[in-house]
Structure formats: structure tokens, C-alpha cells
Image (cartoon, rainbow, N blue to C red):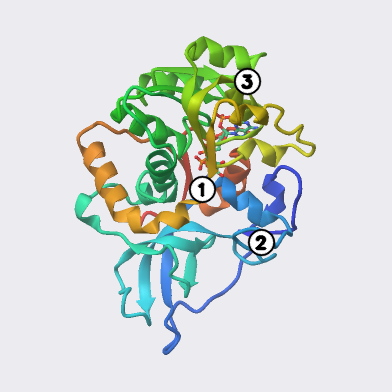
Amino acid sequence: VVLERYIEEQPKETDMAIKMGKMELKASKGSGSFLVKNLYLSCDPYMRGRMRDFHGSYIPPFLLSQPIEGFGVAKVLDSDNPDFKPGDFISGFTGWEQYSLIRNTWQLRKIQQHHSLPLSYHLGLLGMPGFTAYVGFYEICSPKKGEYVFVSAASGAVGQLVGQLAKLHGCYVVGSAGSSQKVDLLKNKLGYDEAFNYKEETDLDAALKRYFPEGIDIYFDNVGGAILDAALLNMRIHGRIAVCGMVSLHSISDPKGIQNLFCVVPKRIKMQGFLQSDYLDKFPQFVEHVTENFKLGKIVYIEDMNEGLETAPAAFAGLFSGKNIGKQVICVARD
Ligand code: NDP
């Protein structure tokens, strides 16, 4: 799956195309590379940023007409790298293609299968989005038991774990999502105390006042835009806002901007952006914490699995209209 052209507007399925090509299924001697068969691929909103012809971000644009790069789970078939042997399973940057030749091992991990959770979980619950929830909540939000927590895009890959970590921490948690089905999942599967469909609210400020009559201590912001603006009005003194992402801005060609930023001064709000990749030393403790709680049934996980590499463009575009229910993953092959 390749990117056909750089885009400024909301991603569409037709911005990507399927191309056939041949590759040699072996790692050449002395290259340090290894060849993998891709099993599961991840659709992540940050990839939208790589579809712009813009070089000033923390990660460069995709190369046109080359397989799209993204997180995947794969099986090593042939290797010239002593750290990765045929038969190993890995998670990390691979390509949106059936086989990938890997040289760059940044954020690449060998999957330890002793906890025997499904391999695809290493793209969500036990992968980059889960880790984002973990560092965003514990490192950026400085949570305390009993605090009032609000999460947007709450049923998505990151949001679903933030809410559950906050519940385990003894917080009161409310989530917003874009459909009644997602609201139902938040309340009845993911353990949120309350949830609402932001698309049905004509006044987001009033909605937050309804769910947080005493105000919000922590806002975990996955979306930016109008929801962030309303949250600012409802923050308590010394509240914290973890700015994780601004997925709503990807689909707006002329964003109105935030009107209520002044609230950070009188309310002494701490508002901080972060990148999960700055905290990689904490990855082992994250995996242990989440695996343990998952096995105890204290954490659940919702995955949205599409079958076949050819479904990736539509699945990716669907992230920006809320089509995915839980973590969006593509199954390329099962083994
Ligand atoms: P999700 O699985 O939550 O999928 C994206 C969701 O965003 C959609 O399902 C939709 O849910 C919601 N959405 C789409 N458009 C809008 C809109 N206009 N307004 C409000 N909500 C919208 O994605 P992730 O959990 O993977 O990512 C969540 C956020 O975390 C993103 O902003 C992403 O960029 C960020 N992120 C940040 C990282 C970091 O290191 N800082 C790392 C990983 C992710 P709904 O139906 O509820 O609207």
C-alpha cells in the first residue's frame, strides 16, 4: 500500500493505492538487515502527519510510491542481524506490504510470548497506543485517587486504556465518543463512570458541567479543537491537561482556534504535550502492569480487526470519521 500524493485535507481511501512489486525474500550478507513476514499492521492517527509534504515535524513525510511505514507485528524469516533470528516475532516499524526488509530497529521489540496474549495486542494494548496511555496518564497527569478525569476519543486505542488506568487509580472518569455504540461500550465494558456522545451535544460546555459539576482535575486530550476549548472552561484550579493528540484538527481546513486558553492563568492549569517515544525506558514496567491487570480481568481491550492488506486504506481513512470501534488493526496473515 503506497501513498499516491501528499494531502492537506482529510485522508481518503483513494489517496493510497495497492501496487504489486517483487522483492528477494532474503537478507543480504553484511547488511545487518532482516526479512519479516508482516502479520498485523496498525492504523494510527499520527500517520496522517506523514502524508503532508512538511519536513518540520518530529518524523519525516512518507516517501511517495513506497510502501507506507507503520507499526506492525511480524515474523522473522531470514536475518543478517544476530539479535533477530528466524522464527522470532517482532513489533515495531515495518511496512504496509506482505514482506519487509528491516534495517531500522528504533522502537522495535522482540515479542516475548510467555504471556501468550494475541500477537495483534502488541499494536494496541501492549504496544505504542497503550504505552501512550500509560505515560500520558502517570507521567503527565500526576493523578491522585478521587480526582475527576475526562478523556476524549475515549473508546479508541489510547483512550480506552487511559480510562481504565484512571479507574484502577481510584478516579472518577467520564469519556466522550462519537456514537451511541461507543458510549455504551465506555459505560458497560470499559468501566467509565459516565460517557456522552459529543456529536449529540449542542453545547459542550453545558455537557461537561452536567458530568463534572465540581470541575475536572485531569483532561486527557486526544482530539483538541472544540472539546479542548470546553474542557478549559471546566478545569479546576491546579488541573492538568495532557495534550496527547489533536485528531479533530486533521479534518478541519480552517480551525477556529482555541478561545478559552486564558483559563490556564487564573486556574493555574498545567498543560503539557508529550510524545510516548521520550519515555521508552518505562516500556518494560508498562507491559508488566498492563499484562498483570489484563490477566486479572481488571483491564479489557477492544480491537477492530480488518482482514487483508487491501482493506488498510479505507480503515486508515475511517479513523478520521470515527469508523473504528477500538484499536484499528489490519490482519495481513495469521502466521
Ligand atoms: P483512535 O483509536 O481513538 O481513533 C481515532 C478516533 O478519533 C476516532 O475513532 C474518533 O472517535 C476520533 N475522532 C476522529 N475525528 C474526530 C473529531 N473531528 N473530533 C473528535 N474526535 C474525533 O486513535 P488513537 O487512540 O490511536 O489516538 C488518539 C490520539 O492520540 C490521537 O490524537 C493520536 O494522534 C494521539 N497519539 C499521541 C501519541 C503521543 O505520543 N503523543 C501516540 C499515539 C497517539 P469518535 O468516534 O469518538 O469521534
Three-letter code for the amino acid on which mark 1 is drawn: Phe
Q: Secondary structure at mark 1?
A: loop
Q: Which residue is mark 2?
A: 61
The image position of residue 305, as x and y in percent, is 45, 42
Which residue does the image show at 32% across and 33% down from the upper left? 300
The residues bearing labels 2 and 3 have C-alpha atoms spaced at a distance of 32 Å
Which residue does the image show at 61% across and 39% down from the upper left? 247
Tell which circle, 2 or 3, labels the residue nearer the N-terminal end: 2
- Would the CB of label 3 be found within 8 Å of ligand 1? yes
Q: Are marks 2 and 1 in contact (CB under 8 Å)?
A: no
The foreground one among 210 and 331 is 210
Disc nearest the viewer among 2 and 1: 1
Q: Are marks 3 and 1 in contact (CB under 8 Å)?
A: no
Circle 2: is it few (<14), some (14-19), or many (20+) Cα within 10 Å? some
The foreground one among 202 and 38 is 202
The image position of residue 26, as x and y in percent, is 43, 80
The foreground one among 335 and 328 is 328
Three-letter code for the amino acid on which mark 2 is drawn: Pro
Q: Which residue is mark 3?
A: 199
User: Horizontal placement of 294 versus 102: left or right?
Assistant: left
* Image quadrant where one finds the C terminus: bottom left
Q: Which residue is mark 1?
A: 274
Position of residue 4 relative to residue 274, above or below, is below
The foreground one among 107 and 316 is 107
Disc nearest the viewer among 3 and 1: 1
